[in-house]
Amino acid sequence: MGHVLLRNVIQSRYAGKVFPVNPKADNVLGLTCYHDIRETPEPVDLAVIAVPAQRVPDVMEGCGEKETKVAVVVSAGFKEVGSGGAELERQVLQIARDHGIRVVGPNCLGVIDTHTPLNATFAANMPPRGNIALVSQSGALLTAALDWSTTQRFGFSKIVSLGNKADVDEVDMIKALQDDPHTASIALYVEGIRDGVKFVEVAKEAVKKKPITVLKSGVTEAGSRAVSSHTGSLAGSDVAYETAFKQAGILRVSGIEEFYVLAEAFSSQVIPNLQDVVVVTNAGGPGILATDACERHGVKLARMEPEIIEELRRFLPAAAGFHNPVDVLGDARAKVYSKAIRTVLSQASVGAGLVILTPQAPTEPEKTATEIVKARGLFPSKPVVAVFMGGPAVAEAESILASASVPCYPYPEQGVVALSALTRYSRELRRPLRPRPKRLKVDKEAAAAILEGVERGGRISLLGHEAKRLMTAYGIHVPKSYLASNADEAGRVADQMGYPVVLKVSSPQILHKTDVGGVRVNVNARAEVEKIFEEIIYNSGRLVTRAEIFGVEVYTMVPQGREVIIGLTRDPQFGPLIMFGAGGIYANFMKDVSFRLPPISKEEALEMIAETKIQTLLAGVRGEKPSDIESVADVLVRVSQLALDFQDRVLDMDLNPVFVYEEGKGSIAVDVKVTLSG
């Protein structure tokens, strides 16, 4: 392994000094070999370590004595093999910290910088020089990418294998690469993120300088923790990552193919100033496929202006398509393509073009490719993506396009995915960085006292009246409520509140109270209250024999409104996660939800609401008056603040349902469940 690494360093034509170190050799590949790093004649900037795992600590001590800045530990046999390896990894990391050494790995492929140049990996190939930085936890994925890149016509600036990420991780690499002059875009393969909050913070800043694309593996529900709240069960194992990437402005891809499609697009294309796209094609079917793909991927097709349509009519046959997609028909030669492309790109509202060619008898693929290159040169601020469908008939044309840095894909869907990424990133660049929301006036001390009382009682679940008091402390409207310990007390409280009232059993062990007859609504008289109190206590105790019953909660029955759910759950990597969606008993079945990481502003809260289908009902349909969406956004902001104030104590929370009333009449959290960390 060490021999391969050294050979790659030499063959990459690294111009700096190289010191081979091996206790059993005096000369390796024509270079003087030292038996210990301490014997090298000069300080060492970068140490690439490929020795048995048990020897790495001693090598690291030697690196410290030689003032080494970075160590790339290729060696395996650390935490990936079990507890013994994990302890060895901690030892290596401690030595590194004692000497101020940054560590890449262990258990990694190594690092490549094509512009230095330096290939300090054991990969078989040195990739072409380019402007894409590729950072991956998987070394195998990198070796595949390196081999694949030799057949493509774009290259990489940096390639970094993170391995076990004992020290250097994605956050460090994003911070370094965002200002690297040789890197135009950053591509990440991620299996897990250590510090999700820091990741989002750093990525938000970096994407304003260059696009970040991520392929995240491990997206299924398997392994997600079991939770009792709606919010937790709806969040699943991947939602936090999806939410984090979205808020940070990162472009997430679904697979390797899309990963490479975006890499090629960002390696060569300008970022469009406008989002509207025009499709030019010589075949109706592929044009329709492109149109369908545009709708799926959120790409807005430009509406052709009358003067542009009129210009197209001057040189296209009457049977051509003059709107969008623009169908130049199957007999279109290169000059017709050229006129059509230049005409549609001249429209001010068109920000990018997708040119589709299928090889038919009159088609001139090579000449058409040349005309596409010329047209792109006339409109340098508008990216152009080509789709040349076929094999040998279009191979030479693809080479012409590639040599001019015009991405060319074999299928319309890939071209649309590339344009979608470019336009999404264009929108991201124009989205201002929002300042941290100002704190709302709340009673944090009162809220803390409620949580402390629950914790002193040895419980992790708040009782209904405690949860409502917590909401009140944060300015969230809830029905008046009181915990009654006997029937007489319940009747007296109901008289004071006014009828009708709701009665609900108060027990942390009974999560679904309706199922055990623990809830009665629309109770209208004291005698009825007292009778139902006894029934609830009896039924709940009989059906859930081990339940600790604190009494029955009596609260004011409020008018019905539109039902929504607002909640939070805590993700291991990203911390609190706020949810909004359609509420009531169908919350888990409809799964009409959106998520955000706090803190969220009023504007972000409104965006959350707009992402759901329930927003259509809240806005008013078929003559119904609109609901008070502003009040829902206010609740979301307050829940966000509560989540951050108590992020180490509150594990899950559901406000379900929240009744939303007509515009100007507010909203009210009817039922609230809160679970603490314990």
Image (tube, rainbow, N blue to C red):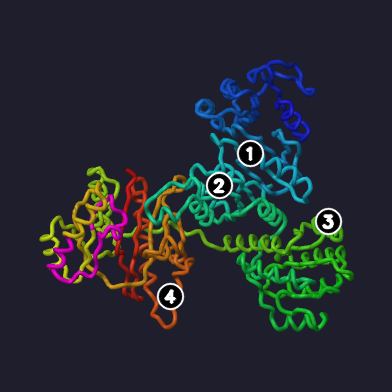
* Residue type at the position of mark 4: Ala
Please name the residue that numbered disc 4 is placed on.
619
* Residue type at the position of mark 1: Ser
Please name the residue that numbered disc 2 is placed on.
218
Mark 1 or mark 4, which has the lower sequence index? 1
Q: Position of residue 435 (x, y in %)?
A: 45, 58
- The vertical placement of 520 against 221, above or below, is below
Disc 3 versus disc 2: distance between alpha carbons? 36 Å
Q: Nearer the viewer, mark 1 or mark 4?
A: 4
Disc 3 versus disc 1: distance between alpha carbons? 31 Å
- Kindly state the secondary structure of the residue where label 1 is placed: strand
Disc 4 versus disc 2: distance between alpha carbons? 37 Å
- Magenta residues span 505-533
Disc 1 versus disc 4: distance between alpha carbons? 49 Å
**Residue drawn at the location 50% of the way across and 42% of the way down:** 194
- Kindly state the secondary structure of the residue where label 2 is placed: loop
Q: Inspect this view and state whether residue 441 appears.
A: no
Magenta span contains residue 278: no
**Residue drawn at the location 70% of the way across and 65% of the way down:** 381
Please name the residue that numbered disc 1 is placed on.
161
Q: Residues within 10 Å of mark 2 (few under 14, many from 20)?
A: few
**Residue drawn at the location 47% of the way across and 45% of the way down:** 573
Magenta span contains residue 522: yes
Q: Nearer the viewer, mark 3 or mark 4?
A: 4
Mark 4 or mark 2, which has the lower sequence index? 2
Q: Residues within 10 Å of mark 3 (few under 14, many from 20)?
A: some
Q: Farthest right residue?
A: 361
Which picture quadrant has residue 79?
Answer: top right
Can you say which quadrant of the picture contains the N terminus?
Answer: top right
Q: Position of residue 652 (x, y in %)?
A: 36, 52
